[in-house]
Amino acid sequence: MSEERIQRILARAGIASRRQAEELIREARVTVNGQVAGIGDKADPAKDAIKVDGKRVHPHEGPYRYLLLNKPRGVMSTISDPQERKTVMDFVPAAFRKALVPVGRLDFDSEGLILLTDDGEFAQHVAHPRYGGSKTYEVKVKGEPSEAQLDLLRQGIVLEGERTLPARIVRRTKGHQRRRGGEGEEGHNTWWVVELVQGRTRQIREMFLRIGHPVQKLRRVAIGPLRDAHLLPGAIRELSEREVETLRRITARPKKKKTEAPRERAEKPIARPKKAAKKKPLSAKRAAQGEPPKKAAPSKAPARKAGVKRAPAKRSPAKRAPAKKDGPPRGRRP
């Protein structure tokens, strides 16, 4: 076998997802041939001795397992818990537990669907937000948020100095209520459907808390297109081949990162008819272009037709000088 990154080897062996494997490497819990491994190091699982917490890592053998669990409230979505609280592994038959890891996390106080698998590559693609795998939640909150408040949440919030990806939030329909045993809107509480691509720790609870409507109940009802409304809390089942292939297909390639929340198209303002601009005289246009205006050409007399004599121009009569009043008129004797 050729060399590959250690976190990939651990993921393929079902030890952990890639993200969890990177955490193991940062904590100096992974060694290769006796040397502490670092992020980006490569190894050959057929030749090198790769160990996690002193235990040898062997390549995965046989088919992978893909399980779906409806996690009840008050259960940790981890393999083990230092406080000895109940974990999702307590609901898995002992024969299936080898190298099994939960895909992503679900809060201790939350309930709903969670995947468990020994296929590290599959877990990485389903859990990591860059592959576009969405998770859908039904959320009951105190009071009724306004549409303006919901728009703020849809655009994403800043958690630990980083803005979360946009979210889809709509009111839960009556069809959801009937399917869930008639859970309607109780008193001043309202139910909402929230769809996330990037699920940060306690993100939904923090979102609604910031707008003054704390979460009362939260359950995950879908992982991508995968749903099972008939799976009771605490029940577990294997995924069908079709369900596995569907999840693989929709998370096969990284998706383009969305930096802004989708906005509704604003109505275009009614365009007012523009007044027709007055045409400038030709000389003014040329003057605007830096050219001197041309002088108007003198008007020409109409052409004379052949054989037609022009009438002589009338002359005005000469003005006579006024007669002198002093003395007798000329030519007469006194």
Image (spheres, rainbow, N blue to C red):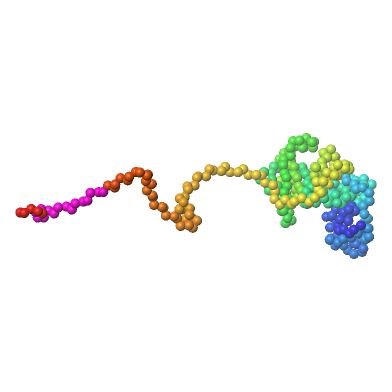
The stretch of residues the image draws in magenta is: 315-329
Q: Which quarter of the rendered picture does the C terminus lie within?
A: bottom left
Quadrant hosting residue 49: bottom right
- Horizontal side of 301 relative to 199 (left or right) equals left
Tell me residue 154's x, y (percent): 70, 47
- Quadrant (top left/top right/bottom left/bottom right) for the N terminus: bottom right
In this rendered view, identify the residue nearer to me: 111 or 150: 150
* Residue located at (94% from left, 49% from top): 62
The answer to whether 106 is drawn above or below residue 33 in the figure is: above
Helix, strand or loop for the magenta stretch, by majority: loop
Task: Name the residue: 62% across, 43% down.
Answer: 267
Q: For the point 47% across and 55% down, which residue is it?
A: 287
- Which residue lies at the image location 29% right of the left edge and 47% below the top edge? 313
Name the one closer to the observer, 329 or 305.
305
> x, y percentage for residue 318?
22, 51
Q: Residue furthest left?
A: 334
Q: Quadrant of residue 311?
A: top left
Q: Is residue 177 magenta?
A: no
Residue 317 within the segment the image draws in magenta: yes
